[in-house]
């Protein structure tokens, strides 16, 4: 039965989401709704809540920062921002950071930085960008312009110009689009919304060589697949390749809205005062969250845990697929970012799992996306698999 809370919300929200449950609190791997029902969360707020819910030290760090200072403009320095920037640079191999409020804003900044670098070389540059088919980079106009799924873009055109789309994992399709005006090649190192497709080593390394030869910015979008989700702090570190510009968000703040784009010195110095800005980005509360997230990752050995538990998730998903060959086409992914491609609508499976007390999310129309909190244990995976087995057996 729909509660009055949902009925009131539907009167006042712009209807861009098909919501169904009112969640009121979380603890560990579990969420609780306004009726007291308990749910196992295997979606982590779309790969955000890497530490699960109600981590006491994380909460205390935020409370302490609130007592000191929540916001001051970027006309001044703050200690949390200085420390957070250092931490990101240390784990990513980048040299400089700009903090944003979200992943989409990080993409916007990354595109601007690549275009400014090209402009500095040639003020007549058209700043063309090559992105990937089936990619997803966000909903703002710039991020939407480089999102390689037509139905997301078409109602909002004209978008920013100079963008073309290559085939993911097809290096020759990228080379065919490169011109003297190309300033950046942008991609997710592991596609999320587009269906959970990992990049091949040949593709990533080939892009790095191509960008070096042509002096083109290589931009890796690690907003969803970064922050330890695949067993490295950033997925590109599996390939032994470093981008020129990196975007990061989601688990960076574990629920506190914060993102960043970072760059090597060569590109970072292209921007000067007046080129870019933000009111809230990198404020003391947001960057205090980043600092504590990194502290918790070290304390809880999150990367070690992901590398230990991820093979179990993969094994269980593959066993489930073998048990339902008429319903499951393929399981693919890296680490704790896995996808299960179905022959039936994923939305139906997700809805039935929710009724059974397991929170899952989809990617597209027929893929279930598994992006649990990085503290997930075998017992949680087993519970989810049992529910999915029941749902797929119906």
Image (cartoon, grey):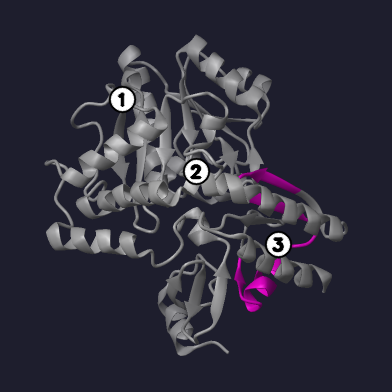
Front disc: 1 or 2: 1
Does the magenta run of residues contain 15?
Answer: no
Question: As displayed, is residue 64 above or below residue 34?
Answer: above
Residue 359 on image: x %, y %: 59, 68
Numbered mark located on residue 346 in the image: 3
**Neighbourhood count class around disc 3 (C-alpha, 10 Å): few under 14, some 14–19, many 20 upward:** many
The quarter of the picture where the C terminus appears is bottom right
The reply to whether dot 1 and dot 2 touch (C-beta < 8 Å) is no
Residue lying at 78% horizontally and 61% vertically, measured from the top left: 344
Q: Earlier in the sequence, mark 3 or mark 2?
A: 2
Q: CA distance from mark 1 to mark 2?
A: 21 Å
Left or right, residue 80 beside residue 208 = left
Give the magenta range.
331-359
Q: Residue at x 49, y 78 (%)?
A: 32
Residue 275 place in picture, x, y as percent: 24, 31
Q: Is residue 213 left or right of residue 121?
A: right
Image marks 3 and 1: residues in contact by CB distance under 8 Å: no
Q: Which residue is mark 1?
A: 268
Query: Is residue 51 left or right of 346 when viewed as pictured?
Result: left
User: Disc 3 versus disc 1: distance between alpha carbons?
Assistant: 41 Å
Residue 133 position (above or below residue 309): above
Is residue 30 in view from this perspective? yes
Sequence-wise first label, 1 or 2: 2
Residue position for label 2: 137
- Residue 18 spot, x, y in % from top left: 56, 70
- Is residue 26 placed above or below 306 in the rendered structure? below
Instruction: Name the element at disc 1.
Output: helix
Q: Secondary structure at mark 3?
A: helix
């Amino acid at each position: 039965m729909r509660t009055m809370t949902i009925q009131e919300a539907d009167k006042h929200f712009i209807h861009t989401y098909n919501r169904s449950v009112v969640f009121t609190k979380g603890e560990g791997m579990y969420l609780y709704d306004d009726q007291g029902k308990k749910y196992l969360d295997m979606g982590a707020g779309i790969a955000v809540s890497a530490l699960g819910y109600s981590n006491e030290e994380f909460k205390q760090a935020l409370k302490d920062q609130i007592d000191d200072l929540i916001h001051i403009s970027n006309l001044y320095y703050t200690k949390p921002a200085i420390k957070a920037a250092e931490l990101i640079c240390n784990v990513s191999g980048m040299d400089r950071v700009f903090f944003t409020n979200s992943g989409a804003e990080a993409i916007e900044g990354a595109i601007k930085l690549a275009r400014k670098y090209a402009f500095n070389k040639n003020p007549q540059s058209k700043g063309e960008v090559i992105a990937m088919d089936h990619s997803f980079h966000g909903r703002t106009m710039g991020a939407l312009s480089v999102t390689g799924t037509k139905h997301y873009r078409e109602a909002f055109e004209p978008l920013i110009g100079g963008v073309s789309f290559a085939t993911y994992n097809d290096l020759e399709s990228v080379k065919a689009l490169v011109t003297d005006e190309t300033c950046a090649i942008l991609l997710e190192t592991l596609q999320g919304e587009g269906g959970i497709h990992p990049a091949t080593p040949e593709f990533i390394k080939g892009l790095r060589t191509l960008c070096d030869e042509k002096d083109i910015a290589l931009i890796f979008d690690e907003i969803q697949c970064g922050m330890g989700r695949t067993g490295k702090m950033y997925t590109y570190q599996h390939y032994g390749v470093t981008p020129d510009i990196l975007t990061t968000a989601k688990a960076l703040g574990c629920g506190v809205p914060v993102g960043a784009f970072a760059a090597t010195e060569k590109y970072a110095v292209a921007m000067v005062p007046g080129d870019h800005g933000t009111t809230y980005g990198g404020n003391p509360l947001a960057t205090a969250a980043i600092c504590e997230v990194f502290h918790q990752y070290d304390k809880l050995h999150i990367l070690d845990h992901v590398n230990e538990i991820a093979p179990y998730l993969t094994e269980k998903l593959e066993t489930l697929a073998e048990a339902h060959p008429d319903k499951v086409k393929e399981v693919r992914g890296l680490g704790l970012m896995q996808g299960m491609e179905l022959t039936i609508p994923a939305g139906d499976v997700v809805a039935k799992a929710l009724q059974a007390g397991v929170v899952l999310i989809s990617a597209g129309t027929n893929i279930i996306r598994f992006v649990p909190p990085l503290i997930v244990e075998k017992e949680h995976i087993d519970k989810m698999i049992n529910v999915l087995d029941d749902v797929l057996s119906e």
